Amino acid sequence: MDLHLDAVSVVLDGHLLVRDLSLHLRRGETVGLVGPNGSGKSTALRCVYRALRPTRGVVRVGGVDLRSLPLRHRARSVAALTQDGGADLDFTVAEVVALGRTPYLRGNAPLSRRERDLCRDAMVRLGVDHLADRGLLSLSGGERQRVLVARALVQEPEILVLDEPTNHLDLRHQIELLALLRETDLTVLVVLHDLNLAAATCDRLGVLADGVLVAVGTPAEVLTPELVRQVFGVSATVVTHPLTGDPQLLYALTAPDGWNPPVRPRTELETRP
């Protein structure tokens, strides 16, 4: 299923956080959103998984306005892993993963054999099957993150939205998780801070700066020294990975001379009562 953000703008508390964001994800494509802190990446994702309603613009899944879909249908179409996606109740890992089936269940109906197998397979894929009987709150941050990804996969969505999914993960599990995303046939929209991981994982990248989409294209097209300097304020040399051919960045530790953060003017959306 394709995903289309059509001229999405978001204003909160009088501040324009995202402005006229238009981005089309084709079915089965992995697209990364990158940009400095406060550039609007998480805000854009919140519009996709319906935690936030755009001030203007439309989010469409499969050509249909997301707002017109029943709640259960939305949950079957879009699964999300958010930065604050933890749990306050100490369910077991198996129980948390099984919650991914909620959009398909009626009342207190038990899981079918297929659904139990689906949960087990997801835990195996994420390497958390040995934690099935452990309480979620007893786990490390990285273990908990992998459990929540397993829950999202059990939801069997067509679109997967991930906000910094590599948070808390060690290097091995970062690589394994991102490799798993590439193996799925899902449409994936993911926010990543690590530009090298983004280049290795994503088919295309969208670069946000101060709420505006300033570039979109393949990693090789987008990750240029000029763009990294202008958007991130970092001097970087782009090299080619000797095994994969992906662009990789080598950073200098000081900001380039003459760099100033991008500044945009206030607009009607901000000034309108």
Image (cartoon, rainbow, N blue to C red):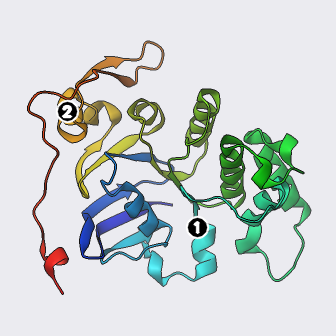
Q: Which mark is residue 77?
A: 1
Residue 196: x, y in percent? 41, 29
- SS at mark 2 in the image: helix
Residue at 20% across, 36% down: 227
Residue 29: x, y in percent? 46, 47
For this rendering, which residue is in front, 130 or 14?
14
Observer-side mark, 1 or 2, equals 2
For this rendering, which residue is in front, 175 or 5?
175
Q: Is residue 69 left or right of residue 226?
A: right
Q: Quadrant of the C terminus?
A: bottom left
Crowd around label 1: few <14 · some 14–19 · many ≥20 (10 Å): many
Q: Which mark is residue 177?
A: none
Query: Real-space Cα distance between discs 1 and 2?
Result: 37 Å
- SS at mark 1 in the image: helix
Asked if the residues shown at circle 1 and circle 2 are in contact, with their CB atoms under 8 angstroms apart, the answer is no
For this rendering, which residue is in front, 74 or 43?
43
> Residue 129 lies in what quarter of the image?
top right
The vertical placement of 28 against 142, above or below, is: below
Residue at 72% across, 57% down: 154
Instruction: Name the residue beneath numbered marker 2.
Output: 229
Residue 116: x, y in percent? 87, 58
Residue 215: x, y in percent? 23, 46
Residue at 61% across, 71% down: 75
Task: Return the disc, 1 or 2, that comes first in the chain's sequence.
Answer: 1
For this rendering, which residue is in front, 86 or 97?
86
Q: Is residue 156 left or right of residue 216?
A: right
Q: Amino acid at mark 1?
A: Ser
> Residue 238 lies in what quarter of the image?
top left
The vertical placement of 97 against 206, above or below, is: below
Q: Amino acid at mark 2?
A: Arg
